[in-house]
Amino acid sequence: MQRKLIQIIRVSPLRCIYVVMSLTIPFYILFANGFKDSYRFFRKRIGYGAVKSFFMTFVNEYNLGKVVIDRFAAYAGKTFEVETEGKDAFDALCSDDTGFVMLSSHVGNYELAGYSLTASKKINALVYAGETETVMEGRKDCFSETNIQMIPIQSDLSHIFAINNALEKGEIVSIHGDRVFGTERTVQSVFFGQKASFPAGPFLIAVQRGLPVVPVFVMKESLYKYKAFVFHLPDTKGLSRADAIQALCDAYAGHLENIVRKYPAQWYNFYDFWA
């Protein structure tokens, strides 16, 4: 099915694919578990009225569909323009011998950062090992033209050794910073006015090794254009481990909130983030 989709996208205009995809959204709204959580996000966190919150929930689902299609469009060979804000700071870190942690998030289309952010260092992207063969092959094809390799998350935790090995060699490790699924270590930070849990792992890795932490957000602007935002979290040297982790998480949560407020319909955490 996914291979067929890639073939269709290869010869079809993206706008047409988007229109066909939009016809399936009412079914997702009726049957998908994330509809109520998405609606509550717009109603309680963003502060929209009931009607606008319902409409924005539809737009949210539609935008997610576009992100998925754009990912397969990249596999099919289509190219997107990515304007990057903060690229100089990213390049400066890449020119240093020390590795760093790059934080991804479930907003926008982070995967396109891998196809557009060229780095002199190797980027090791932590990915879910359960992805389909087509997705993994598509990523390999796209990443083959970049300095990126994937580290699948394994049940035997062997990916931890791959992460440590990459950082010891002064490379970049890309990790999700906004979901706590599969981890017991969390840190709380104020996010949209209420405390929410974030995974402590990415921040702990950075603090233990004294490494910089760089959140990257890639947001869709138009049909073939994205804008990437690269931030550099504050230096926490001199702080205790617990305080350093908290400071990094607070700074990341602040950047994430600012991005989501700017692009609320590109927030793709379809569960109660504050539970």
Image (cartoon, rainbow, N blue to C red):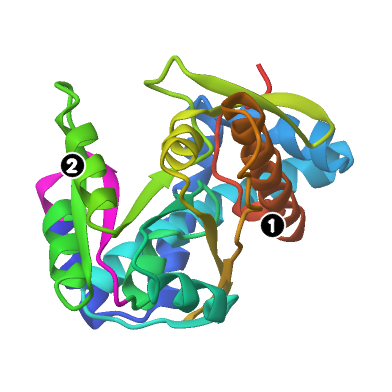
Q: Residue 131 colored magenta?
A: yes
Q: Amino acid at mark 2?
A: Ala
Q: Which residues are magenta?
A: 120-134
Residue on which the image places disc 2 = 162
Task: Please identify the quarter of the rendering in which residue 181 is found.
Answer: top left
Q: Is residue 68 left or right of residue 45?
A: left
Residue 240 point in image, percent of width and height: 62, 28
Residue 236 point in image, percent of width and height: 63, 44
Between circles 1 and 2, the one closer to the viewer is 2
Q: Amino acid at mark 1?
A: Ile
Answer with mark 1 or mark 2, whichever residue precedes in sequence: 2
Q: Nearer the viewer, residue 64 or 177?
A: 177
Label 1, secondary structure: give it. Answer: helix
Depicted 91 relative to depicted 101: above or below:
below
> Can you see residue 222?
no
Q: Is residue 144 left or right of residue 81?
A: left
> Can you see residue 143?
yes
Q: Nearer the viewer, residue 10 or 129?
A: 129
Residue 114 point in image, percent of width and height: 34, 67
Distance Cα–Cα, label 1 vs label 2: 30 Å
At x 66%, y 53%, the residue is 234
Rendered image: mark on residue 259: 1
